[in-house]
Image (tube, rainbow, N blue to C red):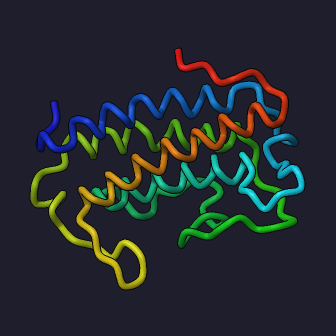
Amino acid sequence: MVTDSRMYSYVVLLDMHTGFFRSALEGISDGDAQRRLDTKANHIAWLAGSLVQQRYEMAHALGLDAGLQQAAHELFKDNKGIQDGLAYPSLSSFLQDWDVITPKLREAMLKADAGQLDHSVEFMPGHKATILELTSFSIYREANCIGQIALWRRLLGYDAMKYM
C-alpha cells in the first residue's frame, strides 16, 4: 500500500516498465546494442545505462543512500550524454544493476509521504521541481526510452518486443 495516494499510478507504471525494459533488451547482442546505424541517435547500450542511472537517481531523491550506484555510474552521472567511440558495458551488466535498484526504488516510492513528495529540488540548472514532479518526469522518460529501444530492435532486425 502506498503512503501517499499520488504515488499509486507511478508505482503501477514502474512495475510495468520493469518488465518492458527486460523485454525490450531480450536477445539483443552487446555488439548490436552499441550500433548507431550511421546516425547520431543514442544507441541501446546508452539508453539502457541511462535508464538504470535514472532509477538510482530517483531512489536517491526519495532518500536512499547516495552511495548506492550502478557499476557504470561514471559514464552516466550528471546526465552525461552519449560519448562517441566509447565501448559501453554489456546489457547484462545494466540488467544486474536494474535488478538491484528496482525493488529498493519501488519500496521508497511506496513509503514516500507528502512531505517528501512536495519537497522542491533543483531539477536542472535554474529549474526546480518537487519530488513528485521529478517522479512524473522520470516515469515518462522511462516509457520514452523503452520505446526507443523497441524501435532500435526493429531497425537492427530483431523481432518486436513482447509486452507479456
Residue 91 screen position, x and y as percent: 71, 40
Q: Residue at x 16, y 44 (%)?
A: 6
Question: Can you say whether 148 is above or below 71 in the image?
Answer: above
In the displayed structure, does residue 50 sit left or right of residue 86?
left
Residue 80 screen position, x and y as percent: 62, 70
Residue 34 screen position, x and y as percent: 82, 49
Question: Can you say whether 55 is above or below 32 in the image?
Answer: below
Residue 26 screen position, x and y as percent: 69, 26
Total of numbered circles in the picture?
0
**Residue 72: quadrant of the picture:** bottom right
Point out the residue furthest to the top here: 164
Q: Residue at x 79, y 26 (%)?
A: 158
**Foreground residue, 128 or 114?**
128
Q: Check the picture and name the quadrant holding the N terminus.
A: top left
Q: Residue at x 36, y 85 (%)?
A: 126
In the displayed structure, does residue 40 sit left or right of residue 50?
right
In the displayed structure, does residue 98 sit left or right of residue 45?
left
In the displayed structure, does residue 33 sit left or right of residue 141?
right
Q: Residue at x 25, y 36 (%)?
A: 9
**Residue 75: quadrant of the picture:** bottom right
Point out the residue furthest to the bottom here: 126
